[in-house]
Image (cartoon, grey):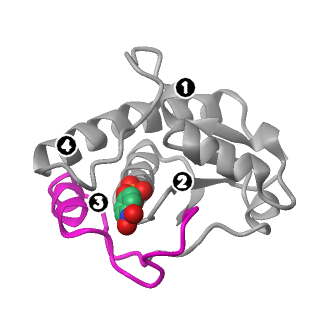
């Protein structure tokens, strides 16, 4: 029996997935659920960078550690994580085509939110801080749903 390992994935790993990582880690701690969490990008544009300054500020205001560094998704992630949470359909397609893919492990973040009005967490990179706030709110709802699922089926491996 191990802790559930969750990986958040977006394109750049500097906006949406680090917010997902930070929010999910904070909410798991608040609920007393032990998890391992990380994030990655399908692209290699921002490897080694801190999250975007707007993601850092919105995450920090919501009590999240935002000191992670961007990395690219890798084939080993299919073995190293129980659940791979993607933001949009482009992420989903890219990850499912990756070498070593285990497609059943990959799900859209908002599929965990029963009240979601759309399937995707939109890319806020070319938006403003309001867009980052909306992304964070979507990821809080999604993280709540993921944690509900983890607590309903403990020890999946
Ligand atoms: P993210 O946003 O996928 O939420 O991290 C993006 C950040 C940077 C780029 C694209 C999306 N970019 O093309 O540089």
User: Residue 110's x, y, as percent?
Assistant: 48, 29
Circle 3 packing at 10 Å, graded few (<14), some (14-19), many (20+), is many
Q: How far is the residue under mark 4 from the one under mark 2? A: 19 Å
Name the residue located 54 percent from the left edge and 47 percent from the top edge: 33
Ligand 1 is found in the corner quadrant, namely: bottom left
- 40 with respect to 2 (left or right): left
User: Residue 64's x, y, as percent?
Assistant: 29, 60
Q: Which residue is mark 2?
A: 8
Q: How far is the residue under mark 3 from the one under mark 4? A: 18 Å
User: Who comes first in sequence, dot 4 or dot 1?
Assistant: 1
Q: Which residue is mark 4?
A: 131
- 7 with respect to 20 (left or right): right
Residue 120 seen in render? yes
- 51 with respect to 97 (left or right): left
Tag nearer the camera, 4 or 1: 4
The reply to whether the C-beta atoms of the residues labelled 3 and 2 are less than 8 Å apart is no
Q: Which residue is mark 3?
A: 64
Q: What kind of element bears circle 3?
A: loop
User: Residue 30's x, y, as percent?
Assistant: 38, 47
**Above or below, 27 relative to 64:** above
Residue 22 seen in render? no
Q: What kind of element bears circle 2?
A: strand
Q: Which residue is mark 1?
A: 111
Q: Which residues are magenta?
A: 41-69
- 91 with respect to 63 (left or right): right
């Amino acid at each position: 029996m191990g802790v559930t390992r969750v990986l958040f994935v977006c394109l750049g790993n500097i906006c949406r997935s680090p917010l997902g990582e930070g929010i999910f880690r904070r909410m798991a701690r608040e609920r007393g659920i032990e998890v391992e969490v990380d994030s990655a990008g399908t692209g290699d544009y921002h490897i080694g960078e801190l999250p975007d300054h707007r993601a850092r500020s919105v995450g920090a205001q919501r009590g999240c550690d935002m000191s992670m560094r961007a990395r690219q998704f890798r084939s080993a992630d299919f073995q190293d994580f129980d659940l791979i949470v993607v933001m949009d359909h482009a992420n989903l397609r890219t990850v499912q085509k990756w070498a070593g893919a285990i497609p059943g492990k990959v799900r859209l973040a908002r599929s965990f939110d029963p009240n979601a009005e759309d399937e995707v967490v939109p890319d806020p990179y070319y938006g403003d801080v309001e867009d980052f706030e909306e992304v964070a709110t979507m990821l809080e709802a999604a993280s709540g749903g993921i944690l509900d699922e983890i607590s309903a089926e403990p020890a999946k491996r």
